[in-house]
Image (cartoon, rainbow, N blue to C red):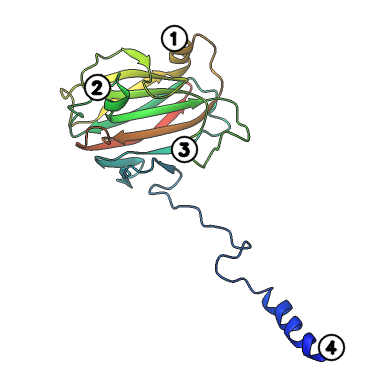
Amino acid sequence: MMKFLWIPLSLFLIFAQIPFFGSPQEKPEEPKSPVKGWWEVKYFPVAPTRYSKAGKGIIKAESVGGRSSLFKAAGEKERNLPVLAWGWKISNVVRSAIETRKDRFDAAARVMVVFGKEGPFKRIGKGEPAGFKIEYIWATHLPKGHFFDHPGERNCKVIVVESGEGRAGPWVYVRRNIHKDFKSAFGTEPPPVLAIGIQTDTDKSNEMVTAYYSEPVLRKK
């Protein structure tokens, strides 16, 4: 009787060490980013914007009724730098967008800065980073220089840095003192920068937009 039980038990011990499909020993693969050095954040159930590399330091964004973001963590030596510089160009604005309404807030191009102290809940590298956020947008109708509370997010201010289709087509270059913008928007000194993001979205309008970004860079001046 003991011999009869010993054979299946020994086989069980051998096979128990072999990782089968779905074994908890297997680590799930991280989703691949469309642009090296950035991670993508998707917003279920919306189709994602298509991001791709379009030359050295250039990112192309194509949105057809879609929305997703790319984020990049700020380096240790960059987190307290006061100036953010980038270039962008768009094919067209989102013509039916109304930026102050949650159900109509699309933008042909936006650059996002997330401020805060890094911690276990900041999710740097996974998901959208938490913190205080400023979004710089290419608006449809709102005038340049206008800033307002994000209609769908807390602790997020939106600043219009370009508006309308008058400059659609060629590259437009932007330089912002993000420390001054933070003080104006939130009334306090800014914490360090956690991450920089970009987003082209047309999920509310179901329109089509193609935008290009030169990767935003943090600088001293």
State the separation of the CA atoms marked 1 and 3: 24 Å
Per the rendering, the mark at residue 184 is: 1
Q: In the displayed structure, would residue 28 be above or below residue 3?
A: above
State the separation of the CA atoms marked 1 and 4: 80 Å
Crowding near pointer 2: few (<14 within 10 Å), some, many (20+)?
some
Disc 1 is placed on an element classified as helix
Per the rendering, the mark at residue 112 is: none
Q: Earlier in the sequence, mark 4 or mark 3?
A: 4
| Mark 4: amino acid | Met
Along the horizontal axis of the image, is 154 left or right of 169? right
Q: What residue does disc 3 label?
A: 72
Q: In the displayed structure, would residue 49 be above or below residue 172?
A: below
State the separation of the CA atoms marked 4 and 2: 78 Å
Crowding near pointer 3: few (<14 within 10 Å), some, many (20+)?
many
Q: Residue at x 48, y 12 (%)?
A: 186
Crowding near pointer 1: few (<14 within 10 Å), some, many (20+)?
few
Disc 3 is placed on an element classified as strand
Can residue 133 be spotted in the picture? yes
Snapshot quadrant of residue 144: top left
Q: In the displayed structure, would residue 68 be above or below residue 96?
A: below
Q: Residue at x 47, y 36 (%)?
A: 128
Q: Nearer the viewer, residue 85 or 151?
A: 151
| Mark 3: amino acid | Lys
Q: Earlier in the sequence, mark 1 or mark 4?
A: 4
Q: What residue does disc 4 label?
A: 2
Q: Position of residue 166 (x, y in %)?
A: 15, 22
Per the rendering, the mark at residue 98 is: 2
Can residue 221 be spotted in the picture? no
Q: Are marks 2 and 3 in contact (CB under 8 Å)?
A: no
